[in-house]
Amino acid sequence: MNKNDLRYIKTEKTIKESFKKCVEKHGFEKVTVSMICKEGLISRNAFYLHFTDKYDLLDRLFDEFRAALLKNYDKNITESVAKNDVLTSTKLYAEAILSIKDDFLFLIKCSRNKMELVIKEVIIDYPNKKIIPDYEELCKPIEIQLNIQYMFTAMVTYTELWFKNFEKISKEEAILKLYELCKGPTTLFYNYIYK
């Protein structure tokens, strides 16, 4: 079937919406392809024309999330990373992640590890690879790996808390807290790289 066909597109959208409803009701681990099909009133064959299993579906949703985050974040990030401007980078992250808040909250329920990897790829690795020619080589020492691990884990954890307490924590407060969490590790990272 043609992936540009409106029926194909509508069925895929139905599958995704049904998957989200099932995860909300039962949790990711308990969701089955049969449950998704029943919720969406579609056949198993229709599901398998689009996805190999629920993990493939989840991967596709993470790919869409990654692309949206990168699109929203990429506009000015390279310049602020090049200047080691942690506050501006934090503001750009907050704006980008806020625009896909519901997707973040849904996907983190499915896989915290995947969410952390996406944040690491888009927010930390992507801009640094653009400005530091041997970035991957410089990240090999265990101290740097721990530093990076701390940053993206802290970012994901605080972002989740912020979104779950959205009425209590303003965007400005969240930006300042994220900045405080990332400033020290970022400074250590750049001091190591540019020593």
Image (cartoon, rainbow, N blue to C red):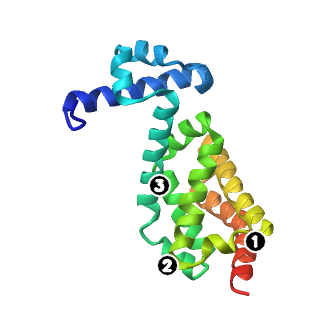
The number of discs equals: 3
Residue drawn at (38%, 25%), measured in percent from left and top?
A: 15
Q: What residue type is labelled 1?
A: Gly
Q: Is mark 1 on a helix, strand or loop?
A: helix
Looking at the rendered image, the quarter that the C terminus falls into is: bottom right
In this orientation, which residue lies closer to the viewer: 90 or 195? Answer: 195
Residue 35, image x, y percentages: 48, 15
Give the Cα separation between the discs numbered 1 and 3: 24 Å
Q: Which is nearer the N-term, disc 3 or disc 2?
A: 3
Label whose residue precedes the other's in the sequence (1 or 2): 2
Residue 129 visible, this orientation = yes
Separation of marks 3 and 2 at Cα, in angstroms: 17 Å
Residue type of the residue flagged with mark 3: Leu
Of the numbered discs in the image, which one, if any, rests on residue 79?
2
| 141 relative to 33, above or below | below
* Residue picked out by circle 1: 184
Q: Which residue is drawn at 42% across and 52% down?
A: 68
Please give left or right for residue 189 compared with residue 35 in the image. right
Quarter assignment of residue 111: top right
Question: Which amino acid lies under the numbered mark 2 shown in the image of this protein?
Answer: Glu
